[in-house]
Image: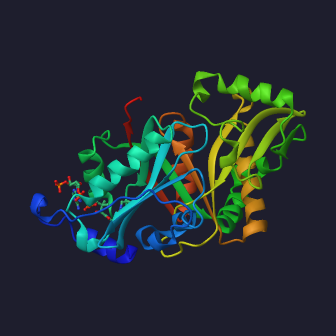
Amino acid sequence: MLAETQTRLRAGPQAPTDHAAMQPRASFPVLRGHAGLFSSFTFGQIGRLLAPLRDDVIAVGVIVGARPVGLAVGTLPSGSTQAELLSIAVAPALRRRRLGRRLLEAWQTEAHERGAAECRASYNASMSGRMALEGLLASGGWTSPRASGVVVVGRVGKMVDEVGTWPSIAGRLALPRSYAFAPLELSAADIEAVERYLSDPEAADMLGPIRQPEKLAFDYSIAVRRDGQLVGWLLATESHRPLVEGDADVPTVRYLEAYLDPAYREGGVMVAAYYHCYSKQMALLGRDSVAVYYTSYDSRPRMVALTLRRFAPIAERVETIFGASRCLPSF
Ligand SMILES: CC(C)(COP(=O)(O)OP(=O)(O)OC[C@H]1O[C@@H](n2cnc3c(N)ncnc32)[C@H](O)[C@@H]1OP(=O)(O)O)[C@@H](O)C(=O)NCCC(=O)NCCS
């Protein structure tokens, strides 16, 4: 279904249609329990969110003539007011008849009823359905899309091999003895340190290991310690997006966030932290598993520069990420 979708979208937008005449009778049920019947309207790992539907997943279907013909899926983590739209699709034969728009509205309404104050969507610059998605979001009153950062997608085996041979980096991969990469088991003093770091305006938009811990994949997330004290973290999550073309089911770990106390930057500690986690990922999920990390233009301009210079040549892909959002009216 996605291949067909992409081919059609590459061919460009279809001619405008007389919507009033052609709007089919449709219902937009909020899906509960198992929603596997709709899985052909999403892709890759997002499909796994459908059966069974977790509490933090918002899925709304489109039904025309008793047949599923579309789906919007996203998440609203518990305690958060930001819902993220992960995918939205309508059957090719029924596009440009306002079903997408009504589906988006139904999905937003459900997100709002579950406590969301804002909806967000982010997508790769090269996504084949980008024009249709941007048109849809604009017609639904979302903000204009803006480039928010860069995402690097690579096979861990290759990244670990290559980074280990970089002359300027290799020496730094052996950590000074005062540092340790430890499992994310936090004492009261650690939590205090995290809260202190997060209160810094530079880290204001970060999760830290304490906001939304349910998002984290603990096997690949670490605390950075210096002489036993927590001085940073590297956080990973399971990814729900197919990030390598034609390889949708390959295990993927997304490295969400890296933070280090400003006093200890420059020493290559963060590169060593990534190296440590990627090596562990390689041991647990295999050389061909995919590691993804995102770095934001706004908060990490130096990391973006390092990424483009150093990691782009050994990665499978480096993509600009765009994002758009919509505030939902308060109750
Ligand atoms: C994106 C998608 C869900 C839109 O569904 P749809 O039912 O065709 O959308 P609608 O008919 O409700 O269109 C609403 C508005 O969106 C915009 N729009 C929709 N498709 C568009 C396209 N191909 N190009 C430009 N604008 C488009 C238009 O402004 C449209 O209003 P208009 O028809 O009055 O001009 C559909 O194109 C689709 O399933 N695409 C494939 C899956 C995909 O790529 N999803 C996005 C990423 S997950």
Picture coordinates of residue 162 (x, y %)?
67, 63
Q: Residue at x 61, y 29 (%)?
A: 203
**Relative to 40, is 48 on the left or the right?**
right
| Residue 249 spot, x, y in % from top left | 58, 73
Above/below status of 35 relative to 74: below
In the displayed structure, does residue 175 sit left or right of residue 157? Answer: right
**Residue 9 percent location from the top left of the image:** 27, 68
Residue drawn at x 65%, y 41% is: 212
The image quadrant where one finds the C terminus is: top left
Q: Is residue 205 above or below residue 217?
A: above
- Residue 266 falls in image quadrant: top right
Q: Is residue 269 left or right of residue 125?
A: right
Please tell me which residue lies in front, 279 or 219: 219
Please tell me which residue lies in front, 309 or 178. Answer: 178
Q: Is residue 317 visible?
A: yes
Q: Nearer the viewer, residue 103 or 42?
A: 103
Quarter, ligand 1:
bottom left
Q: Is residue 94 above or below residue 294?
A: below
- Number of labels in the image equals 0
In percent of width and height, residue 46 lies at 52, 63
Using the rendered image of the protein, determine whether residue 242 is visible from the camera's viewpoint: no
Q: Quadrant of the N terminus?
A: bottom left
Place residue 287 in its image quadrant.
Answer: bottom right
The chosen color scheme is rainbow
Point 37% across, 76% down: residue = 3
